[in-house]
Image (spheres, rainbow, N blue to C red):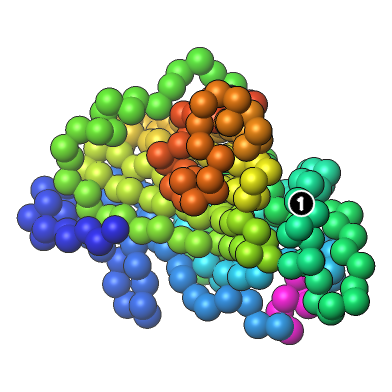
Amino acid sequence: MEVKVEENDLKTAGAELLTGDGRRGIRIRGWEIETLKHSILKSSTAQEWEQKLQTSHLPEMVFGENSLILKHVKSGTKLYFNAFDALCGWKQEALPPVEVPAAAKWKFRSKPSQQVILDYDYTFTTPYCGSGTIEIDKDKDASVAEEQCNLKWEDCEEKIDVVALASKEPILFYDEVILYEDELADNGVSLLTVKVRVMPSSWFLLLRFWLRVDGVLIRLRDTRMHCIFGGENPVILREMCWRESTFEALSMNGHPVDSSVYSDPSAISMKLPVVMHKTQKLTISA
């Protein structure tokens, strides 16, 4: 999705695009929002990740240096999204492996004679909903220190205002970042991405894990965040939703069983039963 940003819209919103050193992002209403994109992990770095994660398995394509960063400058609060933290979540959750149709198991072999034993979650499903930290400028003459802490997200009844998001407000910045992807040995898709959209009144992001094991299972884990500009203490709403269905259950409800029909998660999300839904908020103390 290409977005053409009008200079007048930026000026009216009091925003400016980040420039220099190949930077891509925007500065607006006390926030700096930036995306970073690079190539997939080199083999040497992949080995380091395997050691840190204590695993011998990684997705086919891991974009280890890709990230989305949203920083509230005054408070030092920083939200960020990256592949390593997401894979830490995968390793810790350790869901049981999804069954693969017998006819497709051969695709997971690296050698014709190899016995296929899928004793791990080969779908790389993750509960990851983002990372957070607070940067504290302890000394004006010293470098900024990061205080690793758990941001105080609180459960709430409030919901993201989807009507407001659908209004025809100019988009000042938009980007999509792929964190990792795996084609499950040509047996489906496992994909983790994060999209961000910045308007004059707010920013919005969608972190999405999308899984389709052909003929077996569809799984969708979405994390949405929305922050409306204004006020001394900005509030970020976070909605997490996990939807899932087997192809068998979809068929019983009258839906097609052809995997090619399920290529767009946005088009089928409402057909999938909700497994978990939670809304939280984070109040930033400036």
Q: Quadrant of the C terminus?
A: top left
Q: Position of residue 149 (x, y in %)?
A: 67, 45
- Disc 1, SS: loop
In front here: 252 or 139?
252
What residue is at 32 percent from the left and 77 percent from the top?
Answer: 20
Residue 119's place in the image compared with 236, above or below, is: below
Quadrant the N terminus occupies: bottom left
Q: Nearer the viewer, residue 272 or 93?
A: 272
Left or right of residue 78: residue 275: right
Residue 121 image point, x, y percent: 79, 52
Q: Does the rendering let one see residue 186?
A: yes
Q: In the displayed orientation, state which residue is furthest to the top.
A: 157
Depth check: 4 or 266 in front? Answer: 266
Q: Is residue 49 part of the magenta span, yes or no?
A: yes
Task: Give the answer, above or below, for where 184 lies relative to 78.
Answer: below
In the image, residue 77 lies in the stretch drawn in magenta:
no
Splitting the image into 4 quarters, where does residue 138 fall?
Answer: bottom right
In the image, what residue occupies the spot 84% across and 79% down? 111
At label 1, which amino acid type do we have? Val
Residue positioned 77% across, 46% down in the render: 98
Residue 117 image point, x, y percent = 90, 60
Tell me if 200 is positioned left or right of 96 in this view: left
- The magenta segment is 44-50
Name the residue: 80% across, 54% down.
Answer: 102
Q: Main secondary structure of the magenta part?
A: helix
Q: Relative to the observer, which residue lies in front, 81 or 31? A: 81
Residue pointed to by mark 1: 100
Question: Are there few (<14), some (14-19), or many (20+) residues within 10 Å of tag 1?
Answer: some
